[in-house]
Image (tube, rainbow, N blue to C red):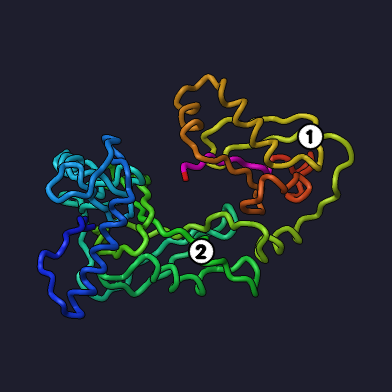
Amino acid sequence: MTTFSAQKDQQNCATPTNNKLNSKLKKLDSLLSSTSKCTICLDDMENIQGSKLRPTLLGCGHSLCSDCWTTLKQLDHTMKEFGVECPSCRSPIVRAVNPPGRGITGFEFVNVVIEPVQPGGKEEHIAVPCTPLTTGEFIISYLNPLIQKEFRRIPFPKEYLLLGIEVDDRKSHEDKLIQLIEFIKGSTLDAVGFRDSYTLHLKRMPVKASHPLINARMRNITFDPPVGSFDIMVKSSTGKGPQVQFKNVLKTTTLGLIQKHLKRRFESYPYPSFVQSVKRAKRCRIMGSECGEWDHTKATLEDLCVDEKRSETLVYDFLTR
């Protein structure tokens, strides 16, 4: 993906075309000036022509100073499937050196793997007509009405579909995922250096309650609100974190209270790397297996239909954004 810096037009021509160009350049200058610190060296950036601290705006929306960008491009990125990555979000910026496979050169069909509606179900495979200039947004819009529905009249909301690029370790001849990179908003297959050795993967993200899809899921649950206190077990959504037991909770216990106690317990967890990831996280999300994202200040265990029998349906997730 190309990078660019703002450059002011030195010729002050009074033509409509140049006036529009000057207006766009001023807006871009304003955007770059509003970005205060470089994400690598943390120095204050200055939007002055020729300065080493002049911002370079990357395609993903993040920026870094000109000096750090020059250094970053000179590093050895040959081991990365997508070459140079944004230091903030790891989005691909410059194509890899000698990536495996063949790029898209014209009109052709690209296979997209779609995760199953229910855990343990079968993946869907849909071929999407693409060109080098096809964007991730177009692919999502194309697939949305075609993917399998949980309920006949309720399509999965498009804004909760995430398109990623899956790269397998072909050197070891194993079907092993070594990288999953989210599409940059507005980026094309050509811009991210998509190859026929890569796989597009469509993932369903948790839907924010309340939503017709969440309501339909909840109606399928047989649930009698518990009387008195009971115990629950909260698991990691990725399976990499520890299980945490909570005793003597009530149906009126909020997700916010569980979230608060989770963070407190993990502060003294014996694995430093996990504790560091918890500290870096900007928020902790609690979900039920049939549900999505809830308002932690209001949602209770009763709202998620959680009792002692269904206690293990709760999962936690530490998010960096």
x, y (%) of residue 221?
A: 76, 56
Residue corresponding to mark 2:
159
- Helix, strand or loop at mark 2: helix
- For the point 14% across and 65% down, the residue is 9
- For the point 40% across and 64% down, the residue is 112
- Residue 255, compared with residue 219, is above or below; it is above
- Residue segment shown in magenta: 313-320
Q: Residue 119 or 182: which is nearer the viewer?
A: 182
Of the residues shown, which amino acid type is indicated by label 1? Answer: Val
x, y (%) of residue 278?
A: 51, 32
x, y (%) of residue 210?
A: 67, 60
Q: Quadrant of the N terminus?
A: bottom left
Residue corresponding to mark 1:
249
- Residue 98, compared with residue 260, is above or below; it is below
Residue 285 can be seen in this image: yes
Q: Quadrant of residue 4?
A: bottom left
Are there few (<14), some (14-19), or many (20+) residues within 10 Å of tag 2?
few
- Residue 309, compared with residue 195, is above or below; it is above
